[in-house]
Amino acid sequence: MTNYWSPFTLGGQAVSLSHLEPHEFPCATPDGNTRRVRVLYSPHVFTREAEAPDPAAAVCFDNRVYCAMRYGDSLNLPTILAGLPNAKVFQTWERRNYVYLAIETHAPDDPYHIFFELKKAGGKRNRHIELRVESAYRKSESSYAPPNRPNAIRFAMLVHNIFLGRPVSFAPR
């Protein structure tokens, strides 16, 4: 079996990205169906933007730099995402993607922002949705947290609408 991620080493040590291999979770939708949500991850969940002082040797995926903090948080992503069917998500200000704020009890003032896009996967007979996590990071000052929180939608309804090709409408604030 081929791994999704290329082998990655940092300072001569292998960094495991096995937790970021594609996986699926079920999502019961309002029409009584259960859709499979296939999850793919961008390297932005464990890297950050390169800055001038970063050595060229530190640059890895997408011309970004490995970030130990983002990597550590990414270890929890599969578990967090499996809970999305029971959660509300928010539309990003760009209105093409969505964000989920994972407010964890050990870090309530430092929410974990998970930015993702959804699309129907494959052809007409395909019964699942693809969720691509574009980025994930902690940010205490957030335009997605109260009182600035944008409109919300239940994740299960979002999956339902995306699967059926319906426009996505968000509840008013």
Image (cartoon, grey):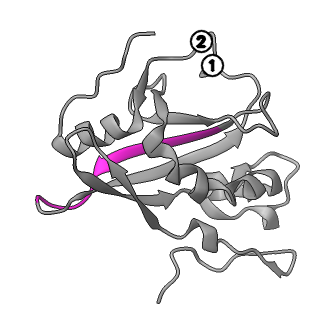
Q: Residue at x 31, y 42 (%)?
A: 159
Image quadrant in which you'd find residue 12 = bottom right
**Residue 122: in magenta span:** yes
The relative height of residue 85 versus residue 20 in the rendered view (above or below) is: above
The relative height of residue 144 versus residue 160 in the rendered view (above or below) is: above
Instruction: Provide the residue designation for mark 1.
Output: 143
Q: Nearer the viewer, residue 102 or 148?
A: 102
Residue 7, x across and y down, in percent = 65, 80
The relative height of residue 57 versus residue 51 in the rendered view (above or below) is: below
Across the whole image, how many numbered discs are drawn on residues? 2
Q: Nearer the viewer, residue 62 or 74?
A: 74
Q: Residue at x 82, y 40 (%)?
A: 106
Q: Residues within 10 Å of mark 2 (few under 14, many from 20)?
A: few
Report whether 116 appears left or right of 111.
Answer: left
Q: Nearer the viewer, residue 66 or 41?
A: 41
Report whether 165 appears left or right of 2.
Answer: left
Instruction: Provide the residue designation for mark 2.
Output: 148
Residue 49, x across and y down, in percent = 71, 46
Give the magenta-colored segment's residue range.
113-124
Image quadrant in which you'd find residue 104 = top right
Check disc 1 and report its element: helix, strand or loop.
loop
Name the disc covering residue 165, or none.
none
**Residue 73: in magenta span:** no
Amino acid marked by disc 2: Asn
Q: Nearer the viewer, residue 14 or 111?
A: 111
